[in-house]
Amino acid sequence: MQTIGERLEEARKRKGVSVREAAEATKIRSDYLQKFEANSFDLDLPPLYIRGFMRSYARYLDLDQERFIAEYDSVAAAEGRAPHRPESRENYGRVEFSESGEGSASKRSSVDQAMLLKYGLMGGGVLAVIGLIILAINLFTSRSETKAAQTAPTAQTAIAQPPADGAQTLTFTAMENTRMKIVQDSDKRILFDGALARGETRTFRKTGKLLVTTEKGSNLRMEVNGRNYPVPLDGYGRFALD
């Protein structure tokens, strides 16, 4: 039975294109495509991006996208990586949202994992102490405030909680002047289409697949629920957030 990589390589050759040509057509880096065809999926990217790249590559090669994603999930689970768990739907990435060691396909030994756990617990203890200190300072400084003012942080905290429907908060910040267009794929509704000045921020509520076109990807910073994610395009192009 052919592996994922063997079928990808066979389909590309049948299409009569080189890896470089496929990379230019899909806007996916050629070294990623080469690793996919070599059955090497331990990239320095979240599984979201890997799945998005694979879906785009399979679509370009006229292959069954969902079959390849399902097989990748099986391979990832067999190799000990976290399987895909959809939210409303998972954030797709050509982009595109557990990380592995840079350029390495080997797994950490049990000793390494124990050391990481040890230091993680130590770091968590330090953060807990810092949190208690900050809490004590906040309580001390708020003693003279009115009852109305004291309730404001509570309301703000409630707003900051993740929505019950699984929606995500998507934020783009312009590092330099650029243009951007965001389309909701389900109904082709345009959420934004315009210019962003340097330092300008736009926030969107994401409940489904979005198509993002950018004039220059390197000029944008992207956050999902407050966590930074790289924009997978340096120049002009389009990527999807599933």
Image: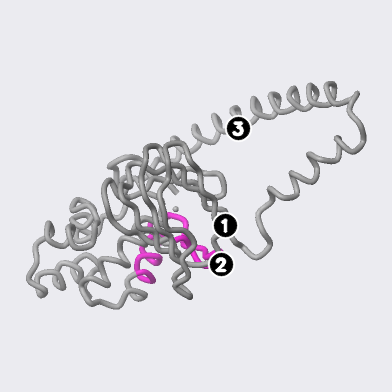
Residue picked out by circle 1: 168
Mark 2 vs mark 1: give the one in front: 1
Does residue 15 sit above or below 35 in this rendering?
A: below
Name the secondary structure under disc 2: loop
Marked residue nearer the N-terminal end (2 or 1): 2
> Which percent across, then down, holds residue 160?
68, 48
Residue picked out by circle 2: 88
What amino acid type should be assigned to the residue bearing mark 3?
A: Leu
Q: Is residue 132 left or right of residue 55?
A: right
> Which percent across, then down, holds residue 53?
31, 60
Crowding around mark 2 (Cα neighbors within 10 Å: few <14, some 14 to 19, many 20+) is some
Crowding around mark 1 (Cα neighbors within 10 Å: few <14, some 14 to 19, many 20+) is some
Question: Which image quadrant: the C terminus?
Answer: bottom left
Question: Which image quadrant: the N terminus?
Answer: bottom left
What amino acid type should be assigned to the residue bearing mark 2?
A: Ser
Q: From which residue to which does the magenta span run?
A: 69-91
Q: Is residue 32 left or right of residue 195?
A: left
For the residues marked 1 and 3, what is the alpha-carbon distance in whole angstroms?
Answer: 29 Å
For the residues marked 3 and 2, what is the alpha-carbon distance in whole angstroms?
Answer: 32 Å
Does residue 163 sit above or below 44 in this rendering?
A: below
> In the image, is residue 87 part of the stretch drawn in magenta?
yes
Marked residue nearer the N-terminal end (3 or 2): 2
> Which percent across, then down, holds residue 211?
40, 63
Residue at the (30%, 64%) spot, across then down: 54
Residue picked out by circle 3: 121
Crowding around mark 3 (Cα neighbors within 10 Å: few <14, some 14 to 19, many 20+) is few
Mark 1 vs mark 3: give the one in front: 1
